[in-house]
Image (spheres, rainbow, N blue to C red):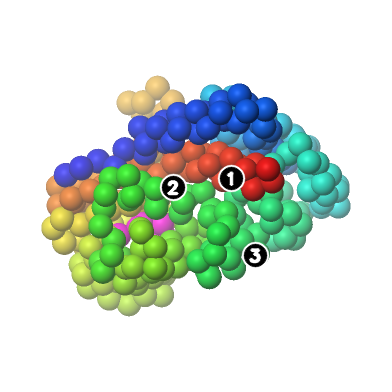
Amino acid sequence: MILLDGKKTAADIKEEISLEVRDLKNNGKKTPHLAAVIVGNDGASITYVNAKVKACERVGFESSLIRLPEETTEEELLNEIAVLNVDNNIDGFIVQLPLPKHINEQKILMAVDPDKDVDGFHPTNVGKMALNLPTFISATPFGILELLDRYNVETSGKHVVVLGRSHIVGSPMSILLSQKRKIGNATVTMCHSRTQNLKDITLQADIIVAAIGIPEFVKADMVKDNVTIIDVGITRVGDTSKKNGYRLIGDVDFNEVSKKAAYITPVPGGVGPMTIAMLLKNTLLACERKS
């Protein structure tokens, strides 16, 4: 069993990006600039955005953090986005989700300039991704592709089962892995809450992408020997033995499934660290497109 180490791979990618940024600066070119907008005081969102800011510092990016109060109106947020859209100093920006309930998330995401949408959520970029055209691929699917590539996991001709159909992970992964690309050319089955005989399907899978949001949903009796497991899930569960009172677990029963797997991502330390690394990669791409 080989562990797909997202923490190490993400660190390698950040080091590669930092070298590219150094070259840009040495050649008198623009330093990439990523901005993040956060509305309210959601603890997980604040932690995640702060991690993005630190990652920018590490690779030599400029970064801006725009914090808005919980009571910010939809119109005020749209105005903030309009300013970022025309700010030539900012190459890419993200609006941290979730937003307060009084703000329409889809309306906000639609307002972001597709050329600065480094999260890859705008319909223009989703459409380009579906057509296999150059675009920003959203960070989590992009990170999964990169992990598979760097560990030389063969996908061509393989049967991939994707558990979950979210717009952030499940749907794009099913499209990307079926496309004619280096990490692709797979036969993909997408499963969800209405799928019948799920175990029969997962037992056929050479690769399983678990993004269903149910802790330890995938059990050892649901997978065949030498399967590749990409565990996207992350859930906090109480654990009094831990200093912080909880531990993180994925959508896969790691202890049992890992005994049958050829490759598997850990939780934490698998897909999660790759997400920020690929956000940085998209920002670098956005900057290079403008030069």
Relative to residue 284, is residue 229 drawn left or right?
A: left
Verify CB contact (< 8 Å) between mark 3 and mark 1.
Answer: no
Q: Amino acid at mark 3?
A: Pro
Q: Which dot, 1 or 2, sits closer to the camera?
A: 1
Q: Amino acid at mark 2?
A: Gly
Pointer 2 residue: 143
Pointer 3 residue: 123
Could you tell me which residue is drawn at 55 percent across and 59 percent down? Answer: 134
Q: Within the magenta stretch, is there residue 136? A: no
Q: Dot 1: what SS?
A: helix
What distance separates the C-alpha of mark 1 from that of mark 2?
A: 15 Å
Position of the C terminus, as image quadrant, is: top right
Per the rendered image, the range of residues in magenta is: 208-212
Q: Is residue 57 above or below residue 36?
A: above
What distance separates the C-alpha of mark 2 from that of mark 3?
A: 20 Å
Could you tell me which residue is drawn at 44 percent across and 47 percent down? Answer: 143
Residue 129 appears in the figure:
yes
Position of the N terminus, as image quadrant, is: top left
Q: Is residue 14 above or below residue 288?
A: above
- The secondary structure that dominates the magenta segment is strand
Q: Amino acid at mark 1?
A: Leu
